Image (cartoon, coloured by chain):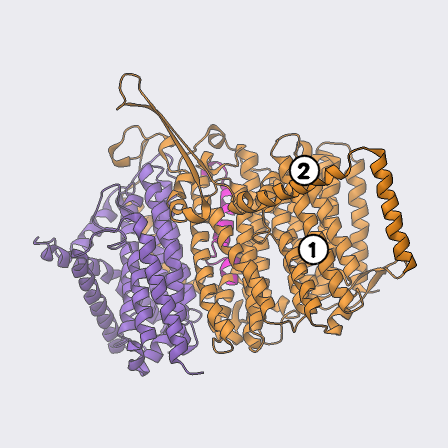
């Protein structure tokens, strides 16, 4: 089979697998939190049931809402593309989709913009409020993300994710180097801010003074909401998968065979589920930051990224 | 016959035709059509001249002047050709747009002739082969644009101070340039650019010349802190003029700086820091001001400052890495791509802003909304332009910013300490700029186009005329074409760049051997389409099973009185950012609370006022102007109208001259 076709098929399988797994990952996170809070929890499969319910319901659109329904499908497509660009279950790529980190970031940001526009299109005070806060956080996260990428790409001399991962697999010691560790922490903070987790945003609140993501989707209903929820779950899964693979680059399928792909999918889902569970545990002990303290958190993570870049100058000999 | 000569002669002929038509045609639609057509031809012939120069035509045109030994000379160079081409392309679109757009003062004889002169001057600047020709063309461009900025001075009081600021700053730029280029010419004892480049002179004098000229060019380019004319002049000029100024004229400043780096290739390292010192604050301050302003055209003007900052950063990186030719060439490519891309999306944005102004009578984002329903074409163009300005795929802005980032991360940190220290900082600034640009243009598009109208003007908006629509769509197609097929553009740019800087791959992709990176937008799009297709099919099936229901009111957490006044506005959208960057923006807020007479606990009304002024202007320029005022006042005491004093002055002057002659 040609490499082109193999790569495309592998990526397609990855997108399908992550799409199916994303609600489960969210379910794991919620269930862990519920148990630790002393509740029984709705079960790991509840997000899937929610999604099925939403997709079957009629959406209700208020007069004056223009593009929200189109944008919500586009948002899901952007999340799908994000999953396709990241080496999650497989390191194989379709031609032209080399997983360049700047392309990945731009697709990520495209998703941010789409959901911000959905919030604005609602035409209510809440939608705009969430959208404005969301874009502020996104704008302030951007330096951290790019500086972390910079730090990760210096040792290998390329901003391509598959190259970075391959280097890490062949030389596992480089993962715990100061450069990599600092960059990973910075990246994790950025991912937490981008996916709207504690302490930046509380995914389970509907308190108008604190919510960011929920405020944007407040006016969405039925399948519009379904697409948006699926998209944000996929986005979270993909980003956690990126962090997990950078921290533990094992089990990633390098060739197009059924067992390799199966191992790859299982490995990545397990890694993400573990990370989601850890995040769930940490979130129990965290309170949401005041919105205007978030820039301080972002500045802190930027400093970590900056330190990583500086450290790379010290460790890599010319 | 020489192709270049033919193209330039055609350009000169069309200029004469355009002026004739603009002056002679009777007012009304006829004049607009004829003069607009002539200006279109004018810009078109300039485009041809630019294309010819870019593709490596030879030739030399000398126009004798009454002053002996001072011929005006034009010589085609690939770099100059590119800038003429860009200016010409923008000119064609703007002229087409103007046919349907102009009305009142902007359709007058003066306005049309100034438009033609402006276009012609701008085409000639990058083709000039010596200092004098360059300065003459520069001044023609400046005068043409000054007249155009003043066009609507009878309609709005705010036009005059804006025009005054522009006139002063553009002449400051001219003076700095005359001084700087004069010094460089003196150092190599020739005014010809070829001789200046060949002389390879160096030393303190050349550095002075370089800094003066860079400041002059930066003034034209709108770099902080010399940008103050830009956010005033762009909003007040008619939109087709704003587009031409922002997308093309500002680029002449960039061309000038690139020209300087070609004339003086072996300058000391700190020259790069001068350029970087202009670029970093421009990028950050420009986008910060853009993100908090709610006047659409002012927002676009500040975004121009931001983009100029990014271009200057790219040029500075190229200057910082002379030991790494691959990286320097990639950075130069980034500068060129940013220039071309900004020209494309800023044209689209200013033209759609003009269309919004035309259709709603509003420039204030706080009073827009719901335009997607009423002005679909304009909204589409605005969306493409905003995507480009926010550097999102698949637009030209993304390709350009991607190239800049590639140059930045591959600039080897071990070349020298300066680069090592500076690059991470540059990366941080570029990233924050990109993040804020995202917010700015989400705000611009979302508030203007989506949700419900916030004013009667927006509620009764109408779509633009056919010529405007065609021009806007052409501009937005340019943004998408460059974003989708950057490889095709690279083929054109090979004459400017060192060989092997970049190559086209596959179906219009772009590869940068110097940075070991490749980008293939068509593949990404193809994959995205393949991915979206099943989703759209699913969405369609779901829609048939459970049809959409409409409701007259949004939910709004149970509120039943959701009026359109309760929507977020551009000002409220930027409010969190205003708070975060309060130190840099220094907003002044005023909240007036009126209580009900009977009780202090019940509110009757509340008024909120927020003012954001340009800190550079209010803290820096105002002081300079005051100082100049004082000097002027002092100077007035010399002239008190007393004839005896004047006689004494003449006597003193005579004595000084005699002493001079006797020695």
Residue at mark 2 to residue at mark 1: CA–CA distance: 24 Å
> Can you tell which chain is drawn purple?
A
Q: Chain of mark 2?
A: B
The main secondary structure of the magenta stretch is helix
Image quarter for residue A63?
top left
Image quarter for residue B424?
bottom left
Q: Which residue is mark 1?
A: B176
Q: Specify few, some or many for label 1: CA neighbours under 10 Å numbering under 14, 14-19, or 20 or more.
A: many
Q: How many marks?
A: 2
Residue A130 relative to residue A204: left or right: right
Q: Chain of mark 1?
A: B
Q: Is residue A187 magenta?
A: no
Residue B285 relative to residue B241: left or right: left
| Residues at discs 2 and 1 both on one chain | yes
Q: What range of the chain is rendered magenta?
A: B373-400
Residue at the spot 66% in from the left edge and 33% down from the top edge: B153
> Can you tell which chain is drawn orange?
B
């Amino acid at each position: 089979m040609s490499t082109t076709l193999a790569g495309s098929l592998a990526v397609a399988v990855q997108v399908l697998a992550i799409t199916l797994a994303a609600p489960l990952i969210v379910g794991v996170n919620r269930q862990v939190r519920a148990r630790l809070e002393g509740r029984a929890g709705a079960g790991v499969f509840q997000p899937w049931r929610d999604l099925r319910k939403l997709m079957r319901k009629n959406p209700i659109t208020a007069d004056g809402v223009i593009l929200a329904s189109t944008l919500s499908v586009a948002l899901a497509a952007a999340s799908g593309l994000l999953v396709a660009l990241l080496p999650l279950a497989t390191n194989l790529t379709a031609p032209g989709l080399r997983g360049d980190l700047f392309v990945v970031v731009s697709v990520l940001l495209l998703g941010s913009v789409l959901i911000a526009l959905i919030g604005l299109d609602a035409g209510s005070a809440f939608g705009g409020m969430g959208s404005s806060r969301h874009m502020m956080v996104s704008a302030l996260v951007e330096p951290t993300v790019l500086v972390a990428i910079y730090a990760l790409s210096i040792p290998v001399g390329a901003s391509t994710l598959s190259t970075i991962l391959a280097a890490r697999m062949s030389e596992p010691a480089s993962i715990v180097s100061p450069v990599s560790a600092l960059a990973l922490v910075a990246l994790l903070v950025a991912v937490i801010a981008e996916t709207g987790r504690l302490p930046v945003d509380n995914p389970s609140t509907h308190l108008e003074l604190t919510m960011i993501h929920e405020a944007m989707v407040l006016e969405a209903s039925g399948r519009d909401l379904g697409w948006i929820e699926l998209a944000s779950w996929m986005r979270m899964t993909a980003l956690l998968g990126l962090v997990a693979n950078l921290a533990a680059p094992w089990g990633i399928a390098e060739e197009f065979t059924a067992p390799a792909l199966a191992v790859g999918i299982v490995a990545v889902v397990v890694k993400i589920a573990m990370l989601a569970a850890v995040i769930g545990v940490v979130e129990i002990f965290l309170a949401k930051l005041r919105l205007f303290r978030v820039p301080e958190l972002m500045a802190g993570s930027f400093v970590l990224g900056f330190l990583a870049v500086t450290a790379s100058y010290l460790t890599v000999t010319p | 016959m020489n192709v270049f000569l033919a193209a330039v002669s055609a350009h000169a002929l069309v200029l004469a035709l355009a002026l004739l038509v603009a002056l002679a045609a009777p007012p009304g639609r006829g004049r607009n059509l004829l003069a607009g057509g002539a200006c279109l031809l004018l810009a078109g012939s300039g485009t041809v001249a630019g294309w010819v120069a870019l593709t490596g035509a030879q030739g030399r045109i000398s126009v004798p002047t009454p002053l002996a030994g001072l011929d005006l000379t034009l010589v085609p160079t690939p770099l100059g050709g590119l800038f003429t081409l860009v200016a010409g392309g923008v000119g064609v679109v703007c002229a087409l747009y103007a046919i349907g757009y102009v009305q009142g003062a902007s359709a007058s004889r003066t306005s049309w002739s100034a438009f033609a002169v402006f276009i012609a001057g701008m085409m000639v600047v990058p083709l000039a082969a010596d200092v004098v020709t360059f300065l003459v063309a520069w001044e023609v461009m400046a005068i043409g644009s000054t007249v155009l900025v003043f066009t609507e001075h009878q309609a709005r009081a705010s036009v005059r101070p804006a025009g005054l600021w522009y006139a002063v700053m553009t002449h400051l730029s001219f003076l700095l340039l005359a001084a700087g280029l004069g010094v460089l010419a003196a150092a190599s004892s020739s005014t010809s650019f070829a001789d200046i480049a060949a002389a390879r002179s160096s030393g303190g004098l050349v550095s002075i010349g370089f800094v003066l000229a860079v400041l002059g060019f930066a003034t034209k380019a709108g770099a902080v802190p010399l940008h103050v004319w830009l956010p005033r002049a762009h909003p007040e000029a008619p939109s087709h003029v704003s587009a031409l100024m922002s997308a093309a004229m500002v680029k002449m400043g960039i061309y000038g700086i690139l020209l300087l780096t070609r004339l003086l290739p072996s300058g000391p390292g700190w020259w790069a820091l001068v350029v970087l010192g202009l670029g970093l604050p421009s990028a950050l301050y420009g986008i910060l001001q853009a993100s908090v302003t709610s006047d659409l055209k002012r927002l676009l003007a500040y975004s121009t400052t931001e983009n100029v900052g990014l271009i200057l950063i790219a040029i500075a990186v190229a200057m910082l890495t002379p030991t790494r030719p691959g990286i320097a060439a990639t950075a130069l490519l980034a500068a060129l791509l940013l220039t071309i891309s900004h020209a494309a999306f800023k044209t689209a944005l200013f033209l759609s802003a003009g269309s919004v102004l035309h259709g709603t009578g509003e420039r204030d984002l706080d009073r827009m909304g719901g335009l997607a329903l009423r002005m679909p074409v304009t909204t589409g163009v605005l969306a493409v332009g905003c995507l480009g300005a926010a550097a999102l795929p698949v637009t030209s802005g993304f390709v350009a910013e991607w190239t800049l980032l590639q140059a930045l991360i591959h600039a080897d940190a071990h070349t020298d300490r300066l680069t090592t220290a500076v690059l991470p900082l540059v990366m941080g600034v570029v990233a924050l700029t990109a993040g804020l640009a995202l917010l700015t243009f989400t705000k611009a598009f979302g508030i203007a186009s989506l949700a419900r109208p916030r004013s009667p003007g927006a509620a009764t908006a109408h779509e633009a005329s056919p010529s405007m629509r065609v021009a806007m769509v052409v501009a937005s197609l340019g943004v998408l074409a460059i974003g989708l097929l950057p490889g095709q553009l690279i083929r054109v740019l090979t004459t400017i760049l060192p060989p092997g800087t970049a190559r086209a791959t596959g179906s219009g992709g772009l590869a940068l051997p110097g940075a070991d990176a490749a980008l293939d937008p068509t593949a990404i799009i193809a994959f995205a389409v393949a991915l979206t297709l099943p989703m759209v099919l699913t969405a369609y099936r779901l829609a048939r099973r459970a049809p959409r229901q409409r409701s007259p009111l949004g939910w709004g957490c149970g509120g039943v009185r959701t009026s359109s006044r309760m929507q977020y506005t551009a000002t409220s959208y930027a409010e969190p950012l205003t708070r975060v960057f309060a130190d840099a923006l220094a907003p002044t807020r005023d909240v007036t609370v009126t209580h009900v007479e009977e009780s202090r606990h019940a509110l009757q009304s509340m008024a909120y006022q927020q003012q954001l002024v340009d800190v550079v202007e209010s803290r820096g320029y105002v002081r300079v102007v005051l100082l100049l005022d004082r000097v002027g006042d002092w100077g007035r005491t010399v002239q008190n109208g007393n004839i005896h004093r004047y006689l004494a002055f003449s006597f003193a002057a005579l004595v000084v001259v005699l002493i001079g002659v006797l020695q």
